[in-house]
Image (tube, rainbow, N blue to C red):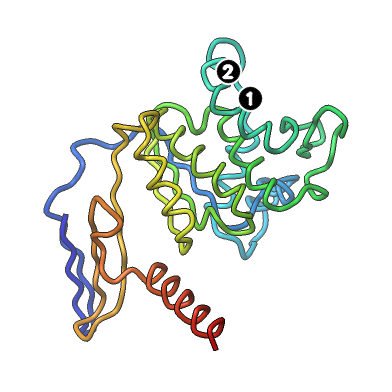
Amino acid sequence: MSFSFATNSKSEVVFERVPSKWIDKAPVFLPTRELLTIYPGFVSLYESRHLEFEETWRDTCALLGAPALRGPTARKIAWVLKPIEDEMGGQIVLDKNGRFYLKGLGIGSMEMSLVAEGHRKLAMLARLIATGSLLDKGCLFWDEPESNLNPKLIREISRTILHICRNGVQVIIATHSLFLLRELEMLLRKEEFKGIGQRYFAIGKSEEGVVLEQDEIIDGIKPLTVLDEELLQSDRFLEESSA
């Protein structure tokens, strides 16, 4: 696939290859903000009033409210779901009033607004796995998975992303976190995740306009802003420490 961008009052994208058929399963989009706390009544309000929210938020909320899987299919995804629930300390449940709670041993039922925001993002992912929205084909688009997460949770998110890929879902993430990129890179070297395809993209500016670079390895993209700034910060830190 190649892209060309014109700068004189028009823009153009040229595709050399296109998919042979449409994907039947609807894609899932996760914004930087968690949506479980705004879920109650959001879909019905969005459909009856003008709200300054992206329509993708409405679509994701509709998926969050779908019934959880049961029976053999639920057992199929248990191995993906369990590490997330262990990290959160409980399971995500939707009560009859349309509110989400974290239910666990020793904590009872905790309303999502009282849960740390990093765990709320994990909870949103767990709910989408539990309902089958992230099961067997389809696409997940995730904007900055690392936002509001500490490094320990980023490691857990990285592993979960690759588990979702193993289930047949294509995952596209936009990130500024070198920590997340390196964590994914290290995991992909392990036997557990061998065979998962990967591709990296970087968009930047040049004198000619917008430049898009892509490669199958992260080190093949030059320049990579997150890497450059990380190295520059390390240099500054060493200089100030030795001063």
Q: Residue furthest front?
A: 242
Left or right, 50 with reference to 94: left
Q: What residue appears at the point 83 percent right and 27 percent down from the top-left corner? A: 105
Task: Please state which of residues 121 and 241 is positioned toward the viewer in this rendering.
Answer: 241
Residue 142: x and y in percent read 48, 51
In which quadrant will I find the C terminus? Answer: bottom right
Q: Residue furthest bottom?
A: 243
Q: Which mark is residue 74?
A: 2
The image quarter containing residue 181 is bottom left
In which quadrant will I find the N terminus? Answer: bottom left
> Label 1, on which residue?
68
The amino acid marked with disc number 2 is Ala
Label pair 2/1, CB-CB below 8 angstroms = yes
The amino acid marked with disc number 1 is Ala
Q: What residue appears at the point 22 percent right and 86 percent down from the top-left corner? A: 207
Left or right, 106 with reference to 24: right
Residue 165: x and y in percent read 40, 35
The image quarter containing residue 196 is top left
Residue 15: x and y in percent read 16, 56
Q: Which mark is residue 34?
A: none
